[in-house]
Image (spheres, coloured by chain):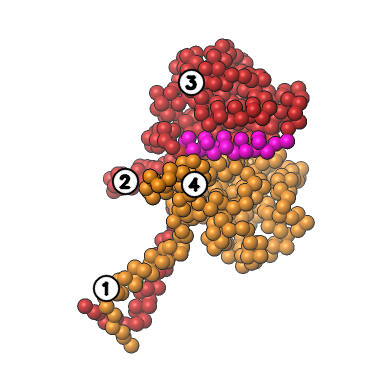
Chain colours: A orange, B red
Amino acid sequence: MALRIHRGALAALLLLLVVHAIDAARAPEPRLEMVTTAASGGAGHTAGRARAAASTGCASWRLGVETNNIRGWYSIPAECRGYVSDYMFGDQFRQDCAVAAREAAAYAEALELAGDGSEVWVFDIDDTVLTNLPYYADTGFGAEPYNATYFDEYVANATAPPLPEVLELYEKLLALGIKVVFITGRHDYQREPTVKNLRSAGYHTWEKLVLKPSSLTLGSSVVPYKSGERQKLVDAGYRIVGNMGDQWSDLVGAPEGDRTFKVPDPMYYVG
Amino acid sequence: MALRIHRGALAALLLLLVVHAIDAARAPEPRLEMVTTAASGGAGHTAGRARAAASTGCASWRLGVETNNIRGWYSIPAECRGYVSDYMFGDQFRQDCAVAAREAAAYAEALELAGDGSEVWVFDIDDTVLTNLPYYADTGFGAEPYNATYFDEYVANATAPPLPEVLELYEKLLALGIKVVFITGRHDYQREPTVKNLRSAGYHTWEKLVLKPSSLTLGSSVVPYKSGERQKLVDAGYRIVGNMGDQWSDLVGAPEGDRTFKVPDPMYYVG
């Protein structure tokens, strides 16, 4: 069966579909209201200048988040939705992950290990070893409020992809003889899909997988839980040579581990 | 003009194009080449592509420095000299400083103060309250080795300008009734030009100005010295409500202070 179609119309249709698909995937253009004073230029500004100012403002906001200067936020600034989308799907995020993983690998390779299997590396799970980008791309990149029901479904599906640079680091650490411990903010009732997801993403072995007791609610800081679990490791005779997470609440609170590595994450904040 | 096309083939073509577009937009392939290679593009790369790759790589390097993932470095990557110069003299650095100062001010304004003058804010001096950009602009933005003789001359001249956003924060803190303590890596023999420079830059008063004992050399970590001086403040009955510096060695080591604020600095590393 065949149909007749005008060549120009076909080209236009294709273009429309492709543009729409890119648009749907990449999310809206950076909006032009600004974080502070930089974009308040008014009518005299061109759209290009305003976009550049918004990008500067959102870049400063992201750096503030990554350096733990900005805390306790519930959603990304509305004007940074396009910026965060572009960042997460662009080269910069992957390069930023690669640098974190490369530094961690270089540090681990230079370690003098006891050779008795006592050295461990602590990893957070969500947006550290696995990426929840599929969930966040569906919910406005942190611009929309956290949807616990939908996120629980996402976890139950066990389909989160690995963050490739971190998976590569994981393999290097195992090859060096460093054991891996996962300490996650996921709840203990989510152990089964978490195990399934870790395995399907390529994380085939670990020394411990520590999930958060269901009694700890979303509102309370995870720092006492996560640092407490690290203390248990130290008390049991392990040496935490490295600790990697996407949230500062993964990395602060004694014992932090001999070195900490922050994976970039401008999508949400966990205190 | 029209063409004949099989309906199934058209659907397949459309699907392919849409999938490809989504793919290009949503799922960048894992790129595992690294920062060091990114800027060395060679003959095949156009200058524009090489510059973009270097910029991405240098931005990742800067983020790695700012998040304390990259430690113990002696000079900036050679290929990032232009990037760091552009950053330091451009809008982004000033916006980054403004966000750090704004977050600190908002935090301080929300504090419930005892009203007995016991609350202090700890500031580092170099590239926190004063900027040494004049020195670093003269010495390749950290691409050239640290020149102790020239830097000592620079300090003796007492001409370092204030970082305007931090000076503004300083004034706000004083107005709130929070006292200021400077803990600097400058040596005690540099007290006189340091006092002169602080005053001429607009820092007219302080509770304490702590300089590093001359016995501590460049090679040793400043963390024991700086955290030790903070401990002395706590022991003397002060509450350190905030702590701001451009180096992580200003901010780590108990007692850190109730909140820490990292001022951006991609020019040098002090461990």
Q: In which quarter of the image is the N terminus of chain A?
A: bottom left
Which disc is residue A34 wearing? Answer: 4
Residue B172: in sight, yes or no? yes
Tell me where residue A150 appears, x and y as whole percent. 63, 65
Residue A8, numbered circle: 1
Q: Residues within 10 Å of mark 1 (few under 14, many from 20)?
A: few
Q: Where is residue A147 in the image (x, y as percent from the top left)?
A: 63, 61
Q: How far apart are marks 1 and 4 (CA)?
A: 41 Å
Image quadrant in which you'd find residue B50: top left
**Would you place residue B117 above or below residue B58 in this image?**
above
- Chain letter of the residue carrying label 4: A
Question: Would residue B121 be visible to someone looking at this image?
Answer: no
Name the element at disc 4: loop
Q: Is residue B95 magenta?
A: yes
Q: Where is residue B257 in the image (x, y as percent from the top left)?
A: 68, 32
Q: Are marks 1 and 2 on the same chain?
A: no
User: Tags 2 and 3 in contact by the CB under 8 Å rule?
Assistant: no
Amino acid at circle 3: Ala
Residue farthest bottom in this picture: A1
Residue visible at 29% across and 74% down?
A: A9
The answer to which of marks 1 and 4 sits earlier in the sequence is 1
Evaluate whether label 2 is on the same chain as label 4.
no
